[in-house]
Image (spheres, helix red, strand yellow):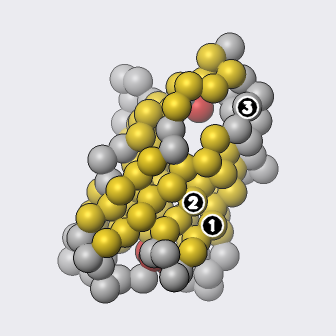
């Protein structure tokens, strides 16, 4: 299983970015994919995920600003990030939760300047 994350970059506060994560070599549903963020000097934290019913859920810090979506045909999930704040800065990782283990993408850096 390989997860390829992309879309990070440098953006000013209030701006937007869209992250993508493409899964290859996986038989698992992309409904099990999640996004995490690791801010400088902090632990990795969950940002967004799909619920078992197929809807989406977000950590409180990101609700109303971030939108998780997927394209099953492309086996790709997206994280649309709007109204970005400097505190959103960090490395964003996509994750695939499989029955026996988790798979991680390589991470993509998001830097929000004030």
Res 38 → quadrant = top left
Q: Nearer the viewer, residue 40 or 112?
A: 112
Q: Residue at x 54, y 49 (%)?
A: 19
**Above or below — where is 110 with respect to 93?**
above
Task: State the CA–CA distance, disc 3 to disc 1.
Answer: 19 Å
Q: Where is residue 56 in the image (x, y as percent from the top left)?
A: 65, 69
Where does label 1 land, which residue? Answer: 69
Where does label 2 land, which residue? Answer: 78
User: How many numbered discs?
Assistant: 3
Q: Which mark is residue 15?
A: 3
Closer to the chain start, of discs 2 and 1, is 1
Q: Is mark 2 on a helix, strand or loop?
A: strand
Q: Nearer the viewer, residue 38 or 13?
A: 13
Mark 3, other Cα within 10 Å: few <14 / some 14–19 / many ≥20:
some
Task: State the CA–CA distance, disc 2 to disc 1.
Answer: 5 Å
**Residue projecting furthest to the front:** 74
Q: Do the residues labelled 2 and 1 touch (CB within 8 Å)?
A: yes
Closer to the chain start, of discs 2 and 3, is 3
Q: Position of residue 80 (x, y in %)?
A: 66, 51
Q: Nearer the viewer, residue 35 or 108?
A: 108
The quarter of the rendered structure image containing the N terminus is bottom left
Q: Is mark 1 on a helix, strand or loop?
A: strand
Q: Residue at x 59, y 54 (%)?
A: 79
């Amino acid at each position: 299983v390989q997860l390829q994350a992309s879309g990070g970059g440098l953006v000013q506060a209030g701006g937007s970015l869209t992250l993508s994560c493409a899964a290859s070599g996986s038989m698992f549903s992309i409904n099990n994919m999640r996004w995490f963020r690791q801010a400088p000097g902090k632990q990795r934290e969950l940002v967004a995920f799909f619920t078992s019913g197929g809807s989406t859920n977000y950590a409180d810090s990101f609700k109303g600003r971030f939108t998780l979506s997927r394209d099953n045909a492309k086996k790709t999930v997206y994280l649309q990030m709007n109204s970005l704040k400097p505190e959103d800065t960090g490395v964003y990782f996509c994750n695939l939760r499989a029955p026996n283990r988790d798979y991680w993408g390589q991470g993509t850096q998001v830097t929000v300047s004030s």
